[in-house]
């Protein structure tokens, strides 16, 4: 389809800002556009295809499942859903899981759970403390939790009950807490907000503070989870367990799925009829999730992610030393941001035109999110394009 941009604007809401590209095929870290051009994909569908495109285990699982049964609804027991919940709980702090279809829905679940938990076990507070610069989704409640005004514009009044405090500031959380607080919601690394890392005392301090006040600590691991930071979950990278955690994105390697995981006392407040999703955790999505989890757990992908992440970070820091436009390179594993002293979009366009897909976040941050299977050779190819990109514009 040659005039895809015109067709998109003719038929679709203009809501996402799209790049002038239509990708039609993927294999590993590579994708091809409708004109047959090849690209190295360092976006991974926004941290979704962590195993790479067309991963054989995921492809085989969904092909087999599609021939058996796709969907029966939440009215019935679902075998791969049980299996995926078992894998998730056996490999995390959590006791129970609720499946849904996206990151926003996973966070909605956590927010409802927090209110109900406070009513049954705490002081009945309804306020959630979240951070400036955070991103938690686009539904009204998750948008209200999101601490970035640019996403709020046009949608007021927001859902009441959210207080935003600066990220990485424990005192601000302490000061914002009251008998009205029911939870603290935080991304272990602010991903959309510019790849902002927590200081060493921040996450442990949050857990202590939440325990002291009897409120829930919710980690939004929608982007950091499933191997992205070099451990299965970022809370393991930072060695701080939350009470509740949300996942989505890479859980299905491209098949839409979300999950809210919780310790038993918190999970237990979600009694029959309090929450449900028609599609959530259906056979197809959870079968894909099982293949993803098994691949992440069985293979050497997590150590590979740590090693290749360090290699990419070193390469980018080398470029930063030679390119005065770069203010900082930061990240964990394969979630890496390069902060520029100017808008990053022209660098994204330059790289795209030379066969490398990156994205810009928070305006000035070039983000690197390759599949976890990326090789040194592929990293070298990307570095060879990024360096001149920073010299050119
Ligand atoms: N939470 C975080 C940390 C995210 O990065 C995102 C999406 O980028 C979301 C939630 C929302 O996920 P979804 O777009 O699947 O609703």
Image (cartoon, rainbow, N blue to C red):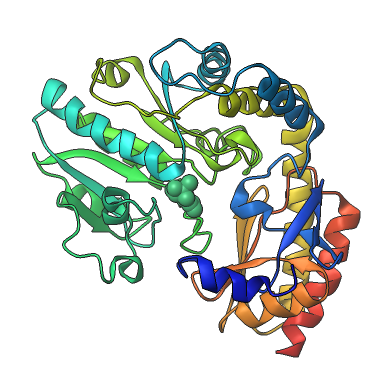
> For residue 63, what is the image quadrant?
top right
Residue 62 on image: x %, y %: 69, 27
Quadrant holding the C terminus: bottom right
Q: Residue furthest right?
A: 377
Residue at 79% from the left image edge and 48% from the top image edge: 308
> For residue 182, what is the image quadrant?
top left
* Residue situated in front as seen by the camera: 247 or 71: 71
Total numbered labels placed on residues in the image: 0
Please say if 15 is above or below 159: below
Residue 131 on image: x %, y %: 32, 55
Residue at 16% from the left image edge and 29% from the top image edge: 118
* Residue situated in front as seen by the camera: 99 or 365: 99
- Can residue 200 be seen here? no
Question: Left or right: 384 with respect to 131?
Answer: right
Question: Left or right: 309 with respect to 240?
Answer: right
Residue 120 on image: x %, y %: 13, 21
Residue at 51% from the left image edge and 39% from the top image edge: 248
- Can residue 25 be seen here? yes
Question: Left or right: 148 with respect to 281?
Answer: left
Quadrant holding the N terminus: bottom right
Residue 343 on image: x %, y %: 56, 82
Please say if 252 is above or below 68: below
* Residue situated in front as seen by the camera: 275 or 223: 275
* Residue situated in front as seen by the camera: 247 or 190: 247
């Amino acid at each position: 389809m040659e005039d895809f941009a015109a067709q998109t604007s003719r038929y679709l809401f203009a809501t996402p800002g799209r790049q002038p590209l239509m990708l039609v095929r993927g294999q590993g870290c590579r994708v091809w556009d409708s004109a047959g051009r090849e690209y190295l994909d360092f976006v991974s569908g926004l941290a979704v295809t962590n195993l790479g495109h067309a991963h054989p285990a995921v492809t085989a699982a969904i092909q087999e499942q599609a021939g058996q049964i796709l969907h029966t609804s939440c009215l019935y027991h679902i075998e791969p859903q049980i299996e995926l919940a078992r894998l998730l709980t056996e490999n995390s702090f959590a006791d129970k899981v609720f499946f849904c279809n996206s990151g926003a829905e996973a966070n909605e679940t956590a927010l409802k759970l927090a209110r109900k938990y406070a009513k049954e076990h705490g002081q009945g507070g309804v306020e959630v403390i979240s951070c400036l610069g955070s991103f938690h989704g686009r539904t009204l409640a998750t948008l209200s939790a999101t601490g970035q005004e640019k996403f709020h514009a046009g949608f007021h009044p927001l859902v009441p009950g959210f207080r935003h405090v600066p990220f990485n500031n424990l005192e601000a959380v302490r000061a914002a807490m009251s008998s009205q607080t029911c939870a603290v919601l935080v991304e272990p690394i602010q991903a959309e907000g510019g790849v902002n890392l927590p200081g060493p005392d921040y996450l442990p301090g949050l857990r202590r503070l939440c325990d002291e006040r009897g409120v829930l600590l919710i980690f939004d691991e929608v982007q950091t989870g499933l191997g992205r930071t070099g451990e299965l979950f970022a809370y393991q990278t930072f060695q701080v367990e939350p009470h509740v955690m949300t996942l989505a994105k890479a859980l299905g390697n491209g098949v839409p799925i979300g999950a809210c995981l919780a310790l038993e006392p918190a999970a237990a407040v979600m009694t029959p009829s309090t929450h449900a999703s028609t599609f959530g955790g259906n056979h197809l999505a959870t079968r894909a999730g099982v293949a993803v989890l098994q691949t992440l757990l069985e293979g050497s992908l997590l150590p590979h992610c740590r090693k290749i992440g360090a290699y990419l970070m070193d390469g980018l820091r080398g470029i930063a030393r030679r390119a005065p436009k770069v203010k900082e390179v930061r990240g964990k594993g394969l979630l890496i941001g390069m902060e520029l002293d100017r808008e990053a979009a022209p660098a994204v366009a330059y790289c795209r035109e030379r066969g490398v897909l990156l994205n810009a976040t928070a305006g000035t941050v070039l983000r690197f999110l390759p599949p976890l299977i990326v090789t040194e050779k592929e990293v070298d190819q990307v570095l060879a394009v990024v360096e001149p990109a920073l010299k050119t514009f």
